[in-house]
Image (cartoon, rainbow, N blue to C red):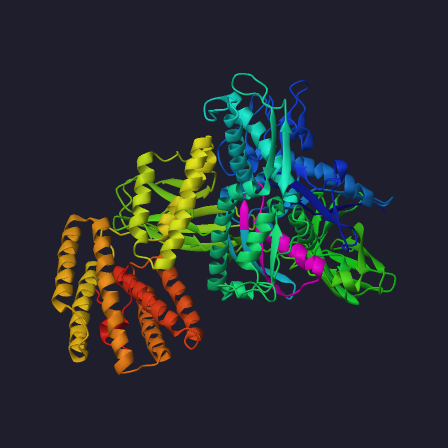
Amino acid sequence: MTQYVSKAVGIDLGTTNSAVAVMNPTDTDIVIHKGGMNARTTPSCVWRNPGNGELVVGRKAFARVGSEPEPITSVKRLMGSRRTVTLAGEERTPVEISAEILREMKRQIEEDVAEFDTPDVTWVVDRAVVTVPAYFDQPQIDATRKAAEAAGLRVVDLLHEPTAAASYYCWRTGTRDGTFLVYDLGGGTFDVSVVRCKAADFRVLGISGNTMLGGDDIDTALARHLQQLIQGDDWAMDLDLENDAEDRLRFRRLKSLAESVKKGLSNSEEFMLRDSGGLTDKEGQRVVIDTVMERAQLEKIARPLLERTFQYCDEALDQATREAGVTLADVDQIILAGGSTHLPLVREMVRSRLCSPAPGSPAPDGPRAKCTEPVYEQVDTVVALGAAVRASAVGGLDILNEERTVRVGFRGTVVTAADRTVVGGTVEALDPDLDLTGGSVRLSTEEYEDEAQLKPGGSFAFTRIPVQPDAQSLLTIEVLDADGELLATVGRAVVHDREAGAKPVGNPVRAAINAKPILLEVSREGRTEREELIPALRSLPFKERYDFSHPGDTDTVEFRLYQQARQIQVITVPVPSSTPRGTVIDVDVEMDVHSLITVRGSIGDHPFEALVEVPPEAELPSEAQVADLTRAFEQGVEFLAAGEKSVKKAKMEMAHTAFTDALARGEKAVAGHEFEQMQAIADSVGKPEDGALQPPRADFEELVKDCGQLNRYVATISAKTEAPHDEREIAAAVEVQREQGERALSAGDQRSYSEVITQLQHIFDHLRTVAYRHQQENEPVAPADVAASRLQSALEMLAEVRRLVQASRTATAQHRQDVEDIGQRLAGLQSLIAQDPNRVQQEAAQERQRLIQVKSIITPGSRNEPGGGVLPEALNRGPRR
């Protein structure tokens, strides 16, 4: 009996390097392809030989970097866009180039799988689990799927790269329960995920990252440094990368040198860089480079880029806290992935920022993971290895009979630790003349036989099948039609191995999730808003129905889909212009396990359907647009607490720097991506609606009133204690700020208004400090009691605003999320009352003020209710920034 067996393989399609692996026939070990010089990775590089037109993928292609015709590198950064690349004078899409890389991965692993063949069994490679960055947008994920299909692979699953790394770590160590933070810094992307493994099943709790941040950027920055050194030696190397093709080749050569320097300094404190022929300057002179590079130089260049990665770590942890109450202190291990983590500075920064200090070291300034060192093992291939583990579990085995008329697909792995096992799967007729309706499957071993009816869809299952201990049992599967006639016979092994069978591989069902929320832009009462259609971390497939109202006076209705700040589709639906305003629009949104979005619905009696496709490429912003965005951010950030403000400003500064650097290099795709990052940061701080200044006038007037109340209170207690206090001077200062604030409100001048609020808050803080000091000296109240009072006041306001948000028609999804975030933070303060009451007092007051701001937005004209507590009412209020 000859049969054909297909086992899904795992492919890490990387920006710089790719790798492919597969579990062996017994699912007890992983086979990773090794190429020339025992290399376990292949450069993601494609070149066309101008002599014979042959396409070359991998090391031979990478050797052509810096020469004509140029090879294609880092194409992963263009996935999901309409940009093309030029390959030997021919325009090719990123999907086509990626398909060539995947086709090479398929060819490579076929060499290894061929060694599994026996006289009765031929192994084939036609299915794969392909990994994608966790923070890929939907168009990027869809482009990856299309590339795999074009390479002749059926996509079993599209697995997030950090989840793959965690899967391999748990499989290798036998860890069935734990919480992990995966720090994945590759050549072109950075991803961070918080992943929980519970009872050998995996769940992603938090995701963040940047699909345009990686080792390539370190290479670019180091190449700039080398360029400056060369210019300092009087070589003509003032390069015009945007307009001069030869200059771009020179810089590509510099990047190649920079990469060799980076790799050398990853293993040594010094690296001797010598090159005397590979680079020519603009005058055609061969540049001679002979210099010693020190690791400290590289670290100075790389550190600003690496600093940015920890912002994304914080975002992923914040999401994990909201999703499951998980903080950094709950993380058992930090797992490193990606070739750029070979840089010692990366490992040191991860250790110092995220890991617990070694015994005897000073206590950290905040929570840390339980481990003292990150896991740094097989970082170049850990994603491919994890993909192979998941491919075995999710893909199982597909077995075709000798005539290739019937396919039997088995779920799960072939290895088990139990004495009895479960075998299940599906039967599919490949010959249209075969009818499986009413058919059955007979399973037999040397000592056991059972039969099961085929369910609709061809599924079947057998339970409690005895297996030989510490051995391999061969199962014979016979497919019968409704009359009991034999249609096909296949065989499948079951391996009993207590150690290997106990290793976690995850649920055999796909674990696909939506990494970033999908939003729909709608117009309500003249205002443009974005409503959340598919939330972040929602399991896939997902399907939901939404209702909207027709705006009237138009013969087309547009549906604009966004994924965070990035527009991913505009769906235009023609309708009769006579369609009345208010006609109900029904919209069904569906996202499948491969993140493919389908939108269908009806406007009145007019149905429509559209697939989400790659959107038109956004034009780069003008200087005026960048200035407007920066100005809006600066206005919005003023109302955040000091700590949050500094974090947002740092994020914006780094994104803006990356944007301007990319523009200078002529890297338009990177520049556009970084501008989207800037937009997302600006949106996250909020912005005034309908041109209204923030905080609302009611808060401004109340702050003025509070300053007056506290001034009179302090004057009263100062008179009793003969402490110096000039009530008239402070009252005059408050009045000056009140007048300036009124003028700013009338003029719509947010900047001047913000300065007024800041000055009033300084006055308020000074008076409150004096009042507290007097209260503690003359009517002592325990700090913990004050903290408890403040927190209770904030919790009461939280309950009220929650009710208002749920009932309000003007409350947005962002308002609801803000309130829930505040609730999470307030809940975390309860345990700190005894050990850090001052912090609780301050943060509870700040959170209460944020709630008041939300309340004023969704219920215009509302005023702050008394805060309660043991001190005068004004003292219970926090900053109005």
Residue 651 showing in the rendered view: yes
Among all residues in the image, which is located at the extreme bottom?
Answer: 779
Out of 305 and 691, give the one closest to the viewer. Answer: 305
Q: Picture quarter containing residue 277?
A: top right
Q: Position of residue 403 (x, y in %)?
A: 79, 42
Residue 608 is left or right of residue 202, and the answer is: left
Out of 671 and 611, give the one closest to the viewer. Answer: 671
Image: 198 above or below 244? below
Image: 842 above or below 227? below
Counting the numbered discs, the total is 0
Out of 464 and 407, give the one closest to the viewer. Answer: 464
Image: 231 above or below 9? above
Q: Where is residue 18 in the image (x, y as percent from the top left)?
A: 65, 40
As for residue 181 lying within the magenta part, the answer is yes
Q: Picture quarter containing residue 443?
A: bottom right
Question: At x 17% / y 77%, what residue is drawn?
Answer: 722
Q: Position of residue 159 (x, y in %)?
A: 60, 50
Residue 307 is left or right of residue 392, and the answer is: left
Magenta-tinted stretch: 162-191
Out of 478 and 805, give the one closest to the viewer. Answer: 805
Residue 404 is left or right of residue 254, and the answer is: right
Q: Quadrant of the C terminus?
A: bottom left
Residue 870 showing in the rendered view: no
Q: Where is residue 827 in the image (x, y as percent from the top left)?
A: 42, 71
Question: At x 33% / y 74%, what residue is drawn?
Answer: 790
As for residue 289 lying within the magenta part, the answer is no
Question: At x 30% / y 54%, what residue is drawn?
Answer: 638
